[in-house]
Image: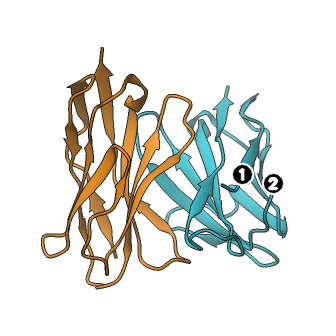
Amino acid sequence: AQTVTQSQPEMSVQEAETVTLSCTYDTSESNYYLFWYKQPPSRQMILVIRQEAYKQQNATENRFSVNFQKAAKSFSLKISDSQLGDTAMYFCAFMLRANSKLTFGKGITLSVRP
Amino acid sequence: GAVVSQHPSWVICKSGTSVKIECRSLDFQATTMFWYRQFPKQSLMLMATSNEGSKATYEQGVEKDKFLINHASLTLSTLTVTSAHPEDSSFYICSARDETGTGWPGELFFGEGSRLTVL
């Protein structure tokens, strides 16, 4: 079974600064998908970024980028130029195949300070 | 992107009654939908996979008779919490895939969630 670990329960960052959220996972498979989801106070889940394990290049989406280290089974999210609207809970998630279920980490609460 | 809608967004009921929560895919058809439960400040825990036209697949530890799932059409799945008790109070979220859309086929779209409070 796959597991996703987010060991930091909370983080805080000053507006406009950069913050990195950590995630590790465990799987014996070589092909899979990794995600970061954002859940703001509205509780609506929003996809931030997706990484395919077979791709060596790290995914980026505007201010959001990942550091995918396949051998180390590490998948961290970097948020650049943090904005107040980035305040949310962030979940790292694993999906084995494109038609399978998501396994979520425990999540981290990120607060952006003005 | 595709839209998934849940109803009601918040429901309060008395202990012992049953409550139904609906999950609809508004602009696409979904053969599979997923139901999650989330406690405050905690992660989403998958409860079951809802399959259109067949029985749901429940995760280990989830009571099938307690949480009834029906996926009668390609756009609607329902979760019924039977004989609800205060410990069933939680946030319930559904998600679905747009398997025939133009985007990545594995992307899951989430409903806005339903908060259940059992008195």
Number of the label disc, if any, that sits on residue B3: 1
Where A71 sits versus B84, above or below? below
Q: Residue A2 lies in what quarter of the image?
A: bottom left
Question: Residue drawn at (55%, 72%), measured in percent from left and top?
Answer: B106
Amino acid under label 1? Val
Question: Looking at the image, which is closer to me, B113 or A48?
Answer: A48
Locate residue B103 relative to residue A10 in the image: left or right: right
Q: Are marks 1 and 2 on the same chain?
A: yes
Looking at the rendered structure, the number of numbered marks drawn on it comes to 2
Q: State which chain disc 1 sits on.
A: B
Where B96 sits versus B13, above or below? below
Q: Name the spot of residue A14 as percent of width and height, x first.
A: 22, 22
Q: Are marks 1 and 2 in contact (CB under 8 Å)?
A: yes
Locate residue A17 relative to residue A105 in the image: left or right: left
Number of the label disc, if any, that sits on residue B26: 2
Q: Name the spot of residue B40 as percent of width and height, x first.
A: 46, 33
Q: Name the spot of residue A75 as percent of width and height, x first.
A: 24, 60
> In the displayed image of the protein, which residue is found farthest to the top?
A114
Chain letter, cyan in picture: B
Question: Residue drawn at (75%, 38%), measured in percent from left and top?
Answer: B16
Locate residue B13 relative to residue B64 in the image: left or right: right
Q: State which chain disc 2 sits on.
A: B
Question: Looking at the image, which is closer to me, B106 or B88?
Answer: B106
Q: Earlier in the sequence, mark 1 or mark 2?
A: 1
Q: Residue B62 lies in what quarter of the image?
A: bottom right
Mark 1–mark 2 distance (CA, rounded to whole Å) = 6 Å
Chain letter, orange in picture: A
Q: Helix, strand or loop at disc 1?
A: loop
Q: Name the spot of residue B20 as percent of width and height, x first.
A: 80, 46
Q: Helix, strand or loop at disc 2?
A: loop
Q: Residue A111 lies in what quarter of the image?
A: top left
